[in-house]
Amino acid sequence: MRRRTFLAGGGSVLAGTIISGFVSQPSSNKRLLEAAREPTDAGEAGTSTEMVLPGTNHETPLYEIDAPNDGPTAMVFGGVHGDERSGIEAAREITDWQPDAGTLVVVPETNRVAVENREREGVAGDLNRNFLANREPQSELANGIWDAVEDHEPDVVLDLHRSLGIYGFHREFVGQAIFHSPDAHGERLADRLNEDTVPWYLPFHTFRSEESSLTGPLLFQHAARELGASTYIFETTEFLLDRSTRVELTRVAAAHVLELHGLLEVGGDA
Ligand SMILES: [Zn+2]
């Protein structure tokens, strides 16, 4: 049983080593996540839930969390690809966060059919290729998601994904990466993650940030192009990282994005 437990916890010796790096989480991350989870002194945020595409097989909940102080609106998406579970898991958790200012909108299971089938795509191909420039979104699901985006007029959009390999080693994969609109804080986000969260003994797992052209068909590109929002797509890799490590990287990245855009206030010198 001991061996079984070991395998369930880590999957490989290296993955097991990685977890220990995250157990000794730096105090800056603890403060950051505390700020995300605890209400500000001004009071609790109020949460309301609505359904996107109600009555269809795409029906999926959207959570709106209004902080007691005015501020920007950030939208967080998980499950645009249904097999990328770390983003779904982190986004579900984020529905319980307490922003200090502004409005936090979370859609944890964006492609509900794909999430339920644990597959990348749902019924109408790859949702993250459905947002072409100067065109209507290319599917019923993409239209419903886009309507929700337009309704909430986000200043910030964060789309949570996962990749498989390591950038540079595995040509077809992006590794640990942050692609962002030109005015977003992608480089600062990558720097913070690399300083505080990626262990020194995983040099190939450092995050790189890349400013994206806004001409493509991805949700984060469309939101930047159409609404002028600061947008991000976050990718953590399955290569050598176990599930809980990927979720931890994702939740820390999300908290940093909220802090960088003024939705979270972190005490001390974080
Ligand atoms: Zn993806």
Image (tube, rainbow, N blue to C red):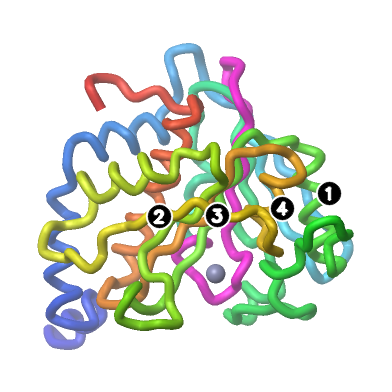
Residue carrying label 1: 147
Please give the name of the residue rendered at 42% of the width and 31% of the height, measured from the top-left corner: 259
Measured along the vertical axis of the image, is residue 263 above or below residue 70? below
Horizontal arrangement in the rendering, residue 254 relative to residue 228 (left or right): left
Please give the name of the residue rendered at 24% of the width and 82% of the height, measured from the top-left corner: 11
- In this rendering, which labeled residue sits more in front, label 4 or label 2? 4
How far across and down, in percent of the image, does residue 251 sit? 40, 50
Please give the name of the residue rendered at 40% of the width and 60% of the height, measured from the top-left corner: 177
How far across and down, in percent of the image, does residue 29 sit? 26, 39
- Give the structural element (helix, strand or loop) at label 3: loop
Task: Report how far apart the C-alphas of labels 3 and 4 lie in the structure.
Answer: 11 Å
Q: Which mark, by number, is residue 212?
A: 3
Q: Earlier in the sequence, mark 1 or mark 2?
A: 1
Q: Report if residue 54 is visible in the image.
A: no
Task: Report how far apart the C-alphas of labels 1 and 2 lie in the structure.
Answer: 26 Å
Q: Which mark, by number, is residue 222?
A: 4
Tell me, yes or no, whether the highlighted magenta stretch contains residue 80.
yes
> Which of the 4 quarters of the picture holds residue 139?
bottom right
- In this rendering, which labeled residue sits more in front, label 3 or label 4? 3
Magenta stretch, residue numbers: 65-88
Classify mark 4: residues with Cα within 10 Å, few (<14), some (14-19) or many (20+).
many
Q: Amino acid at mark 2?
A: Thr
- As drawn, the residue found furthest toward the top would be 42
- In this rendering, which labeled residue sits more in front, label 3 or label 2? 3
Q: Amino acid at mark 3?
A: Ser
Q: Which mark, by number, is residue 250?
A: 2
Q: Earlier in the sequence, mark 3 or mark 1?
A: 1
How far across and down, in percent of the image, does residue 247 sit? 38, 60
Classify mark 3: residues with Cα within 10 Å, few (<14), some (14-19) or many (20+).
some
Task: Report how far apart the C-alphas of labels 3 and 1 lie in the structure.
Answer: 23 Å
Q: Earlier in the sequence, mark 4 or mark 2?
A: 4
